[in-house]
Amino acid sequence: METGLARSVHCNRGAALTLLLLAMAGGVARAQEFGGREKLRAHSAEFRREVIEVADGVWVAVGFSDSNSILIAGDGGSIVIDTTSDVEDATRVRAEFVKLTSAPVRAIIYTHSHPDHTGGASVFAGDGKPEIIAHRLFVDRVPDVGRAGRDGGDQFGSTLPDALFINAGTGLEFGRHPATNGYLPPTRTFSEERLELTIAGVRLHLIHTPGETRENIAVWLPDKRVLLPGDDFYKAFPTLYAIRGARLRPIDQWVTSLGAMIELGADSLAPGHTRPVLGRDSVRAALTAYRDGVKSVVDQTLEGMRKGERPDELVQHVALPSALAENPFLQEFYGTVAWSVRAIYSDYAGWFDGNPANLFPLAESERATRIIDLAGGREAVLAKSRQALAGKDFQWAAELADYVLAVDSAQVEARRLKAAALSELGERQISAIARNYYLSAAQYLLTGLPPQ
């Protein structure tokens, strides 16, 4: 119910709301309850601002924007891989790049179409006319229709007060401080699996590597043994499915793409998010763990489905193998295993979970009315929600409040109870996406309520 409310209510980001949410998320809980949150806070160090040389003539700018931008110096010219989110971020990065080379930009390469990689192109192009290169699917891609149904900004905490925001999982922030967009369309596309080019004396192989997006390309510099994988790899468990509403990513192709990258034997790996990985053994280990982690989640889910398990059953036991669960490149700072399992099930088997009672279920409001009656009335349900909240059974507290909200979306105590439960749940997440969505929904529920 909070999604519809989010679209109709102007977000109040005042100090009173911030303090209220902080109070809800605090309390007397033991410090270890917030272990995930503290790991997420420590993860922010991954985005400290720095221009890092990954090989002779190749630098990556980390922490200046939502995504990284990469500079390759050539003979009488340079190449820029991805261009940050917007004009302001790109201007800061360009100021750093001109300290390294004053050669004009001969080419801009988009690894994929996400706007945090394309919004600063005009700054790097300047008054010149560099070739702008992308895969053909960059322009032929199917629109992400899911965004019409849910606010993508909520998963990135775009309206959260600063006091509640930590990071966005693969970047310091996404969309929290909008700026001028400097996107420039590609001037050249290719549809082959590999395009070999020489630009400003630099040999490049552009390899179609579908993964986080279907148009993703990896840029391989064979003479420097540097791999730029776009968003097919970063230091966090990937978003195989985005909760903002989107199609399942092409997971089988993603696994294949990672395998192809491993075989290149790169000495340096500079992803589109998070810091580079240096050293051939370290690169191979990181990419192999990433591939094996994704493949394991897929394989376990499909095996459970063959046994007739439904999504709620699968998420109880599908997990990364112990050898990978502690791997620093697979921590759930961004995507989660549970969301991936549900999305894989839906992609392979559709919405129906096999239970005939779910073929034509009751409407949500009708079910809620009957549950409330069964429980002894609205006040009894609210009392149980209060009890669950006090007992730190936050998920149950939120679900009980939902029954009341399903029949009366304006019910004040139910909104307060659900907001409190969501705030507590949010503060216990290691996933930035989960945290941001919980806390954003909580603030929408509290907006416009009378003071207590």
Image (cartoon, grey):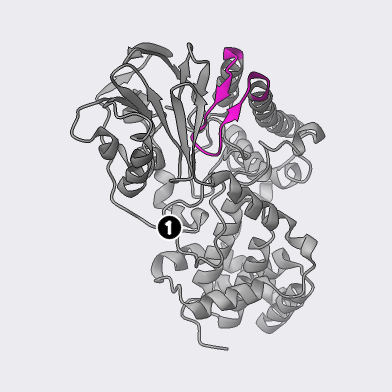
Question: What residue is rendered at 49% in x and 41% in y?
Answer: 50
Is residue 308 in view from this perspective? Answer: no
At label 1, the amino acid type is Arg
Give above or below for 437 relative to 344: below
Front in this rendered view, residue 299 or 423 = 423
Under tag 1, what secondary structure? loop
x and y, in percent, of residue 345 in the image = 64, 37
Residue occupying the point 71% across, 28% down: 299
Q: Say few, some or many: other residues with alpha carbon within 10 Å of mark 1 (under 14 / 14 to 19 / 20 or more).
A: some
* Residue at x 71% of width, y 29% of height: 296
Q: Does the magenta stretch include residue 265?
A: yes
Q: Give the range drawn in magenta.
A: 263-282
Q: Depth check: 47 or 312 in front?
A: 47
| Residue 24 belongs to the span the image colors magenta | no
Q: Is residue 164 above or below residue 131?
A: below
Locate residue 349: give its quadrant: top right
- Residue 47 is left or right of residue 285, and the answer is left
Q: Quadrant of the C terminus?
A: bottom right
- Marks counted in the figure total 1
User: Residue 434, position in %: x, y?
Assistant: 60, 54
Task: Residue 101 in the image: state x and y as whole percent.
Answer: 34, 29
Please give the name of the residue rendered at 28% of the width and 50% of the height, measured from the top-left corner.
Answer: 180
Q: Where does residue 3 sit, x and y in percent of width and height? A: 49, 62
Q: In this view, does 399 lie above or below 382?
A: above
According to the picture, the residue beneath numbered tag 1 turns out to be: 176
The quadrant in which residue 401 appears is bottom right
- Horizontal arrangement in the rendering, residue 297 relative to residue 212 (left or right): right
Q: Nearer the viewer, residue 217 or 242?
A: 217
Tell me: residue 46, above or below residue 106. Answer: below
